[in-house]
Amino acid sequence: MRVCLWRVDWHILVILGIVLVLIASTLLIWYRTWLTNQYWSRRNRAASRVSELASLTGQQIGVVINPSKDGAQMLREQITAACIAAALPAPRFYETTVEDPGISQTQHALVEGADLVIAAGGDGTVRAVATGMVHTGIPMAVIPIGTGNLLARNLDLPIGALDKLLAIAISGSLRRIDVGWLQVSDNGVESVDGTQPEKWNPQLFTVIIGVGFDAAMITDTDENLKKRLGWFAYFWGASKNLKSDRITAQVQLDERDPVELEARTIMIGNCGRIPGGLTLLTKAEIDDGILDVAAVDTVGGLAGWAGLFGEVLLQGAGLRDSPHPRVGRIDMAQAQYTRVELGEPAPAQVDGDPIGMARTIDVWADKDALLIRVP
């Protein structure tokens, strides 16, 4: 009877630990938001001068917008009003569809003479617009209205402050950033005739890709729940995959010898912040021409995942080294090119969008590929 009581108490302690970690994460996000608001309160003069600065450019603005997002119509009206106030030509809008998330719309905007293309939507829209904008030399801006808003967070854009976002889009500073490319060369699924395609088209990412647990979590996250809870909805997808098997992989970094490993997930990033305001890749820089590779693993069941979450919080605060044994760990490396060959096919994701199963992927950095408006 005592053993049974002890086991119940242990599980309660683990759950309480997870709750405390979630509270700490929420407070950290609040504090980051507060700092951002304080920063922008000191830059109100720049925002108020947007009309004066933008009117000097006469730029034609193309807006690739996801009409399914809440407030999309109101956003169209606000962008139009901002252009009128800045004495700019009327913006041209290009709506995305399920079949075409924004690549051809971006190309159409460029053909029609856009001097600036704004991606107004979630991470999928941003990724599609970036795919059409790379190496064009024409600036891109981001107005995030999604759940994760990963690139916007990594660029320190003032999410939720539309007037400031418009000021940045129209007359912000210009910065060249890297992008990454992922190509699935084997998805582990044979066609009807027993053959496989030799290659798929490479997919661009601005922030991070992953195979294993993180992709399964994203795949199993309910879209309606995301609309109600935001990034917290990912905990539901995570809970459904806590007992998933490790992936086994052979990983080659640049010209180095391949290494074999087991992990819950392998993630390769262009920059380090992930949903929830957490920093997973602490050394990642968005303009260094290098991608950061992380093999994430846990032991000990639920306690391992709680420990891993705490590890991410600690390393985000600069406290990575610990003398104590860890039940959650993140092993990191850097490379311009990475090949991952999995023992068995596993789910994959690109900037938070699931792309199906993969067994062999090639990932590489594309330095200074994108010109983007920043604060």
Image: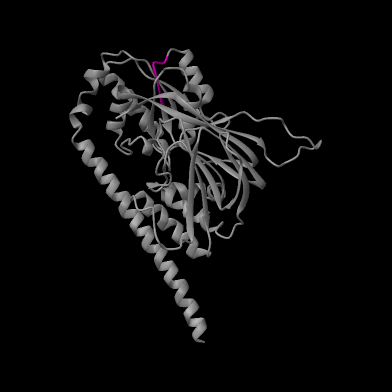
Q: Nearer the viewer, residue 205 or 232?
A: 205
As drawn, the residue found furthest toward the right would be 193
Magenta stretch contains residue 146: no
Color theme of the render = one colour
Residue 68 showing in the rendered view: no
Q: Position of residue 56 (x, y in %)?
A: 26, 13
228 relative to 267 in the view: left or right: left
Task: Point out the stretch of residues depicted in magenta.
Answer: 114-118
**223 or 332, which is in the foreground?**
332
Left or right for 50, reference 79 = left
Point 29% across, 45% down: residue = 33
Relative to 255, does residue 218 appear above or below in the rendering? below
Residue 329 appearing in the image: yes
Pick the front one: 368 or 164: 368
Image x and y of residue 93, in percent: 43, 22
Spot occupied by residue 118 in the image (x, y as percentages of width and height):
40, 25
Q: Is residue 117 magenta?
A: yes
State whether residue 227 is above or below residue 18. Answer: above
Q: In the rendered view, tell whether residue 351 sits above or below residue 128.
A: below
